[in-house]
Image (cartoon, coloured by chain):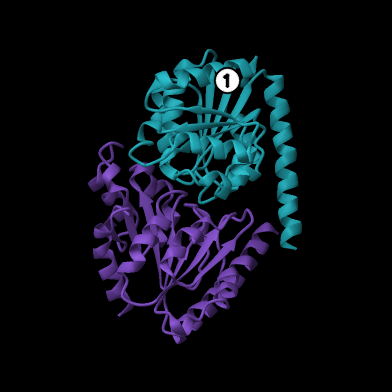
Chain colours: A cyan, B purple
Amino acid sequence: MEIKILTDVMVRNNAKGEDNRARLREAGVYCVNFTSSPGAGKTTLLTNLIPLVSGAVGVIEGDLYTARDAERLQGLGIPLVQINTEGGCHLNAMQISAAMEDVDLGALDYLFIENVGNLVCPSAFDLGEDIMTLVYSVTEGEDKPMKYSTMFEKADCVLINKCDLAEVCGIDLDALEQEVQTVNPRARIFRIVARDPDTLKPWAEWLHGKRG
Amino acid sequence: MEIKILTDVMVRNNAKGEDNRARLREAGVYCVNFTSSPGAGKTTLLTNLIPLVSGAVGVIEGDLYTARDAERLQGLGIPLVQINTEGGCHLNAMQISAAMEDVDLGALDYLFIENVGNLVCPSAFDLGEDIMTLVYSVTEGEDKPMKYSTMFEKADCVLINKCDLAEVCGIDLDALEQEVQTVNPRARIFRIVARDPDTLKPWAEWLHGKRG
């Protein structure tokens, strides 16, 4: 019975995810779902990335509680919607669909979704994105891609963040990349320091190419 | 209907958690449930903490996939059981009950449970522990206690780890502690560097006192 219900939840989510994707495509909006563990640097990344993106960006922020992440982005002067899951461990497609009502999609080129910080549950919920980008902090260690393989397998792109801390954390970046590629050979990998906008340029260019 | 099922799952879990607690108390085993985000340092902590604990320790390791954490602890020569959740986002009391069958509780003073790395879901599942200890890495930022308040509210103890990285990460440890205390005034807070056993001694002593 649990499995039946869980299946229903997933079927409904995925159908709504497809609806969202169709709405976004019709509006010409390219959608990126950013996932990560808590504190891996998604909001800092968005703060420094968005000024580099050629095109109009809107953001949907997901958090259990507070509007702190949306507040951090307010200085960018872009459309922002905050979703509070009230304890929920992931965003779902129904929440995104409702949040999209508060955004003028016709005025956007990109919609960035910052998911709840959780390296497990968000991997199971299609939101209607074009690509899922996983932000992974070197401070989490070299050994997580295989331990949390579901998330790494779903990622179209892995941004290895806080590379400036690799040495002090004793992290071998080549070994970490190798493990990501073992789990997901199709994922594109970029090394970044979200606090340093210069390190984000290669990924901003790649994203521009993906949108086409 | 979803809510009904979820309630059933929680009721069954919590009943089994109470069963586990009764079995552990009868055997004179003090149980600690360690939670954290991925890569916050739980396994490194256990590696350096266990030799400081006066008493016999057994460990149940929880991971989505792999037995890497259990392998890291093998050198300690203590009873170890690995649970793989196969994608599941938390440990539950039924899994702990089954794992306890593989441990000679009569030979232990402490049972340490290393939960799945996830700052959300494990907070909802009582495993039968005496205390829940949250390991929080400074690299995750100052702003998470309120964003992930469910987990912080449940913690009996918060170990602020990787304090040696606070400065390079721009973290104000006093502000972080203040926010933890705002969310949960009863939580005991210790600053540690899990890689440095000397920093773990105050907590080992506190734990010894808790067990009584």
Rendered-image quadrant of the N terminus of chain A: bottom right
Q: Position of residue A176 (x, y in %)?
A: 50, 38
Give the quarter of the figure containing the C terminus of chain A.
top right
* Location of residue B116 in the rendering, given as x and y in whole percent from the top left corner: 52, 57
Image-based side of A32 in relation to B104, left or right: right
Q: Residue at x 53, y 12 (%)?
A: A54
- Quadrant of res B138: top left
Looking at the image, the residue that sits furthest to the bottom is: B26
Where's residue B21, x and y in %? 48, 78
In the rendered structure, the answer to whether residue B160 lies left or right of residue A56 reads left
Amino acid carrying label 1: it is Leu
Q: Does dot 1 land on a helix, a strand or a loop? A: helix
Q: Chain of mark 1?
A: A
In the displayed structure, B61 sits above or below A192; it is below
Quadrant in the rendering for residue A41: top left
- The residue to which callout 1 is attached is A207
In the image, what residue occupies the spot 47% across and 16% down?
A52
- Considering only vertical position in the picture, is A77 above or below B91? above
Task: Looking at the picture, tell me which residue is in the foreground, B119 or A14.
Answer: B119
Is residue B11 visible in this depiction of the protein? Answer: no
Residue for point 70% across, 36% down? A17
The image quarter containing residue A157 is: top right
Image mark count: 1
The answer to which of B59 and A196 lies nearer the viewer is B59
A178 lies above or below B108: above
Task: Say left or right for B93 vs B119.
Answer: right
* Residue A158: percent from left, percent from top: 55, 32
